[in-house]
Image (spheres, grey):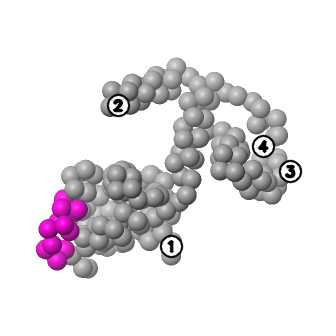
C-alpha cells in the first residue's frame, strides 16, 4: 500500500478529510472487507478500499473525482464489516462537500436534481413516490421518454397502476417538522 510521501499538501488533505469526517483513516488496514461487501463496487466504481487508498496516498484530485462517494447508498455494510470501524458513509458525505467546494462536478450528472426531487417527494408525500420521482427527473432533465419502455413493462406486470401517479399521500407532522428545521438552519447560515 502506497502511503504519503511526506509532501505538505498530501498531509493537509488527509488531515482535513480525517477532521471533517471524524474517521481515522490512518487505522485502515486496506483489507478490502469494505469493498467486498459494498453493493456499488464495480470495475468503474472502485469502492471504499480504493477511495481510502487514494486519500492515504495523498491523491486529492483522484479522490475527489472518484465516483464511489457519489454512488454510496449509505447501507452501512462497509462500517459493519470494517475491523477498525471506519464508516465510509461519513467519509462519502465529507468528500461530496469537499468536491462541491472545489468546484468538481459529480461523476453522475443530474444527481443533485434527483436528490432535490426525492426530498420534495418526501416532504409532500411522507415518502418517495418512485414512479413520480422518475417521471419528474426525466421531465426536468429533458428526457421525457427515457424510461417509457421499462415503465410500460412494469405497468403491464401490475407493479403500479397509471392512476397511482395521480394519487398523493400527505406528509405527517414529524416529517413536516424535520423539513421546517432544515429550512430554519439554511436560513441561519445565509
Range shown magenta? 4-15
Q: Secondary structure at mark 3?
A: helix
User: How far apart in space, not on screen, are marks 3 and 4 (Cα)?
Assistant: 8 Å
User: How far apart in space, not on screen, are marks 2 and 3 (Cα)?
Assistant: 48 Å
Q: Residue placed at 50% from the left, 76% from the top?
A: 43
Mark 4 or 2, which is nearer the eye? 2
Q: Which residue is mark 1?
A: 44
Give yes or no for contact between labels 4 and 2 (Cβ–Cβ under 8 Å). Answer: no
Q: Residue placed at 74% from the left, 56% from the top?
A: 146
Q: Is 99 placed above or below 115 here?
A: below
Q: Which residue is mark 4?
A: 160
Answer with the quarter of the image where residue 23 lies: bottom left
Q: Give the mark nearer the N terminus: 4 vs 2.
A: 4
Residue 169: image location, x then y, percent: 67, 27
User: How far apart in space, not on screen, are marks 1 and 3 (Cα)?
Assistant: 33 Å
Q: Which residue is mark 2?
A: 190
Residue 140: image location, x then y, percent: 66, 45
Q: Secondary structure at mark 4?
A: loop
Left-right relation of 10 to 154:
left
User: How far apart in space, not on screen, are marks 1 and 2 (Cα)?
Assistant: 37 Å
Q: Secondary structure at mark 2?
A: loop
Q: Nearer the viewer, residue 165 or 111?
A: 111
Left-right relation of 124 to 177:
right
Q: Which residue is mark 3?
A: 156
Q: Secondary structure at mark 1?
A: loop
Image disc number at residue 177: none
Mark 2 or 3, which is nearer the eye? 2
Residue 11 magenta = yes
Residue furthest to the top in view is: 173
Amino acid at each position: 500500500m502506497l502511503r504519503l510521501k511526506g509532501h505538505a499538501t498530501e498531509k493537509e488533505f488527509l488531515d482535513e478529510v480525517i477532521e471533517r469526517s471524524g474517521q481515522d483513516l490512518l487505522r485502515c488496514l486496506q483489507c478490502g472487507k469494505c469493498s467486498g461487501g459494498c453493493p456499488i463496487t464495480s470495475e468503474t466504481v472502485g469502492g471504499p478500499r480504493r477511495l481510502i487508498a487514494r486519500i492515504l496516498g495523498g491523491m486529492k484530485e483522484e479522490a475527489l473525482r472518484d465516483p464511489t462517494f457519489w454512488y454510496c447508498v449509505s447501507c452501512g455494510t462497509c462500517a459493519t464489516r470494517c475491523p477498525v470501524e471506519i464508516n465510509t458513509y461519513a467519509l462519502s458525505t465529507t468528500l461530496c462537500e469537499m468536491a462541491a467546494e472545489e468546484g468538481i462536478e459529480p461523476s453522475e450528472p443530474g444527481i443533485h436534481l434527483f436528490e432535490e426531487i426525492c426530498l420534495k417527494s418526501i416532504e409532500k408525500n411522507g415518502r418517495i413516490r418512485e414512479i413520480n420521482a422518475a417521471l419528474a427527473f426525466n421531465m426536468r432533465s429533458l428526457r421525457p421518454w427515457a424510461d417509457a419502455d421499462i415503465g410500460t413493462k412494469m405497468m403491464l406486470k401490475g407493479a403500479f397502476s397509471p392512476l397511482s401517479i395521480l394519487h398523493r399521500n400527505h406528509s405527517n407532522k414529524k416529517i413536516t417538522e424535520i423539513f421546517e428545521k432544515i429550512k430554519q438552519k439554511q436560513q441561519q447560515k445565509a
